Amino acid sequence: MATKGNSGDNRTRSSITIFIVVGLCCFFYLLGAWQRSGFGKGDSIALEITKTGADCNIVPNLNFETHHSGDAGIVDRSKSKVKDFKPCSAKYTDFTPCHDQKRAMTFPRTDMIYRERHCPPQEQKLKCLIPAPKGYVTPFSWPKSRDYVPFANAPYKALTVEKAIQNWIQYEGDVFRFPGGGTQFPQGADAYIDQLASVIPIANGSVRTALDTGCGVASWGAYLWKRNVVTMSFAPRDNHEAQVQFALERGVPAIVGVLGSIKLPYPSKAFDMAHCSRCLIPWGSNDGKYMMEVDRVLRPGGFWVLSGPPINWKNNYKSWQRAKEDLEGEQRNIEEVAKLLCWEKISENGETAIWQKTLNPESCRGSEDNSGVTYCSEDPDDVWYKKMETCVTPATSNADVEYKPFPERLNAIPPRIASGSMQGVSEDKYMEDNRQWKKHVHAYKKINRIIDSGRYRNIMDMNAGFGSFAAALDSPKLWVMNVVPTLAENTLGVVYERGLIGIYHDWCEAFSTYPRTYDLIHANGLFSLYKDKCDFEDILIEMDRILRPEGAVILRDEVDVLMNVKSIAGAMRWDIKLMDHEDGPLVPEKILVAVKQYWVVGSNSTSTR
């Protein structure tokens, strides 16, 4: 009986074994077919990289430390390297592709159209690397950089002559010094901001994001930083050479831009405060179109500061050398448009006037039919290359929301998400995004231990999402330009609601900045986003243009995409390593880290110390 029972058990076990073997064979057959189909391509490449050890896991010889700073001399030691991307001519040292002066002069001057973005067609794009000027050094660390810029980095003295009596900038030996003065604040930016702060609640954290139109060298934004206000400054590339370049060398957020015929590249309700200090913008003309554009980007309850003509024209028309009739008419037009926009003037002191936008603008207009207002019909956040209109952006259902004070606002649920106005984005999804980026940034700091040391001041996130990378990095030592690509989900409003700053951009075109203006560039999934949209080569050349010598790059993307990027970037003057995801080698997503080598005009090789 026992023998018979054992025989039955053996047959049962044999059947189970055969079933398991057949099942495993089917599973691996299907898995192999799936990988060969392309859906599993990332996994197969990840396994191959892990097997061959292709640059992953550790970065032993990638040096993030700077050796060419404003505090030390330059020591050259050449090393040979084959380069497929040649250096551009020395005349392109400060080249801004979409703001080229020669191209600009071919466009109409009405509404400042010629000062707006005009990018070269594909066949005219430079395929070379922009050189640094001779003697270039890494800028001073903040806060010293606020007051001093190495002359070699932006060797232009025109402003020291043109603005000599206005205390903007002074040339002292091998550096420029920025005393903090301005046309409208001869006693210095601090004293001017103190005057504003007596009316605007700057100190309590309720004002965090600011916009400075026609910023000059951005001293207003530079001095607001220590009051925990981050300012987006812009000015055109005009005859006041290097204004925006000086701002970025100082470590102040700024772009090349103008208030002209195209909408500003920011979402609606973005800024807590907007500012114009003698910015030469004709606010009273064009039926108030420019004030209406400021109204679009100013959040309800926000403040608008106008300093200079025509404010207090009765006492100043002679010194301004302007006809008092013209100034009177200009101020009257401004007052009428402000009333239409439901802005209340809360202060006029000397040549400075301050308005506050009503928390609920519709409450002051009565019925829509009788308000005399033409409302804009387009999406107020769809602005890329869209014409500015003479219309008022209507208030939304959550127009009267009051943001939490900063820094609490940084990690609170943003109103756009809390109200459900962003489809498919729940509060849980937002909180999970925050958690993931804290984890990612923790891993980055292990790779590059000087990220939060003060070495990097100007940081760019090329595909910012909700701004969680910037939030995880938050520090008084640095700021992040959160770029939301025009191809991506429109999340820039959330970025601003967190108390961060950013901009819309299409990475098939050049960014509105000078060369060498960012210390660290980060991009998550950017190349996957632009796959088949434009050449990776053009994006990488643009990254090289705006990255400082000895600046760093961190790219996070699918492994097959990064392998393609690495093959192109390997022909540039970058030191590159490909690394595993922090969760291990079998994750298809990888991290590419790079350091741009130091080289200057006339150098056919890099130099290190």
Image (cartoon, helix red, strand yellow):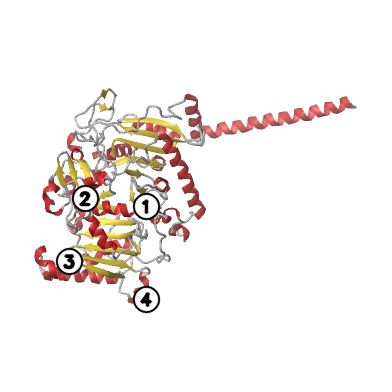
Q: Which mark is residue 556?
A: none
Of pointers 4 and 2, the one earlier in the residue sequence: 2
Q: Secondary structure at mark 4?
A: loop
Of pointers 2 and 3, the one earlier in the residue sequence: 2
Of pointers 3 and 4, the one earlier in the residue sequence: 3
Q: Which residue is mark 1?
A: 500
Q: Which residue is mark 2?
A: 217
Q: CA distance from mark 2 to mark 3?
A: 22 Å
Circle 1 packing at 10 Å, graded few (<14), some (14-19), many (20+), is: many
Circle 3 packing at 10 Å, graded few (<14), some (14-19), many (20+), is: many
Q: Which residue is mark 3?
A: 310
Closer to the camera, 159 or 118? 159
Q: Secondary structure at mark 3?
A: loop
| Viewport quadrant of the C terminus | top left
| Viewport quadrant of the N terminus | top right
Q: CA distance from mark 4 to mark 1?
A: 35 Å
Kind of residue indicated by mark 1: Leu
